Amino acid sequence: MKPASVGVLLLGGLVLAGSGFAQQRIEPPGPLEPRSSGNPLIREGDAHFNRRQDKRVGAVADKGEIAAAVRAYDTAAEAPDSSEARWKLMRALVFQALYTNLDLDRKQAVLEKVRRVSEDGVGLLERRARRAGGSDFSNASPEEIADMVRKESDAPPIFYWAAASWGQWALARGKEAATKVGAADKIRIYASVVSSLDPRFEDAGGYRILGRVHDLAPRMQGETQWASHSEALRYLRLAVATDRASLVNRLYLAESLSTGSPSEKTEAIDLAKGITADAPSPNRLVEDLSTQNTAAADLRAWK
């Protein structure tokens, strides 16, 4: 489903001005900070992505830097074997779709593209796994897929951003229409792979997306019998327990609790108040400010 951390996931379209906070949280570089790459196009994309907060207006990012990052990663992804270029392109496209105030048609076009890139990235890992003696991913459980790709350093971000990409695409397409073409199952499987590979990746992103898809997937006979509100709460509580500093982990748990019992709604309100009072991460300022906007809107709606 940090929201791009998207996460993501499902990562919904989560503008508070930075001056509303006395002090930003001090923390080391997060998992969005790119590792050193030997590909100059990827390094160029990383430089632009790291400037994605420049010229922001509240939680709305300027279009220029992220568009430049997308162009660099897109060109790098023309290399048939670059898994790094693919997940970084997915990450940049999700940010572009969610945080740059695109019009509806342009946003949908970006999300359609990132969905295609996500399948390309997963397909690349599948081909490598088969060459190493593995089976088709379609015949394997998430745990088996995780075992087949465990030595791939790009596997956690590939599957994380694939889950986030499909989630955002599903929200734009319409949840029922997207579920009919298998989106909810893909999101669930990809997020399960992430949680099997590394439960802490992207601030417990696998748990977060699993909780979100259980919460938001439409209950459709023959498609999503697995969807469960109790499972949504279980995964989202796991996400918060794994990384409570994540504003989006707490937001998604609060939104799931808000539909429950009076005590759960009280817990949801307390979580949302904490989110709005917390300091945004300097590493993900746009994303966290957007999450705080959503929490503030939720509080107004729940009163």
Image (cartoon, helix red, strand yellow):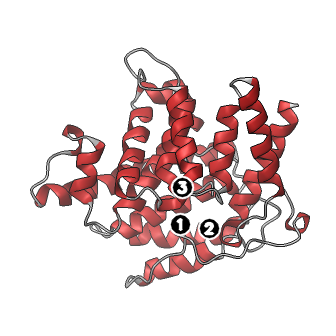
Within 10 Å of the Cα at label 3, are there few (<14), some (14-19), or many (20+) other Cα atoms?
some
Mark 3, residue position: 242
Whether residue 247 is visible, yes or no, is yes
Residue 212 locus on image (x, y percent):
55, 38
Q: Secondary structure at mark 1?
A: helix
Within 10 Å of the Cα at label 1, are there few (<14), some (14-19), or many (20+) other Cα atoms?
many
Left or right side of 245 for 193? left
Residue 181 locus on image (x, y percent):
40, 29
The picture quadrant where one finds residue 242 is bottom right
> What's the amino acid at mark 2?
Ile
Left or right side of 149 for 51? right
For residue 140, the mark is none
Q: Earlier in the sequence, mark 3 or mark 1?
A: 1
Left or right side of 17 for 113? left
| 3 or 2: mark nearer the eye | 3
For residue 66, the mark is 2
Q: Secondary structure at mark 2?
A: helix
Taking the spot 62% from the left edge, 67% from the top edge, the residue there is 66
Measured in 3D between alpha carbons, the distance from the residue under mark 3 to the one under mark 2, in whole angstroms, is 30 Å
Q: Earlier in the sequence, mark 3 or mark 2?
A: 2
Mark 1, residue position: 70
Left or right side of 13 for 145? left
Seen from this angle, which residue lies furthest front? 263
> What's the amino acid at mark 3?
Thr
Measured in 3D between alpha carbons, the distance from the residue under mark 3 to the one under mark 1, in whole angstroms, is 31 Å
Residue 118 locus on image (x, y percent):
40, 52
Vertically, is 287 above or below 14? Answer: below
Taking the spot 67% from the left edge, 33% from the top edge, the residue there is 257
* Contact (Cβ within 8 Å) of mark 2 with mark 1: yes
> What's the amino acid at mark 1?
Val
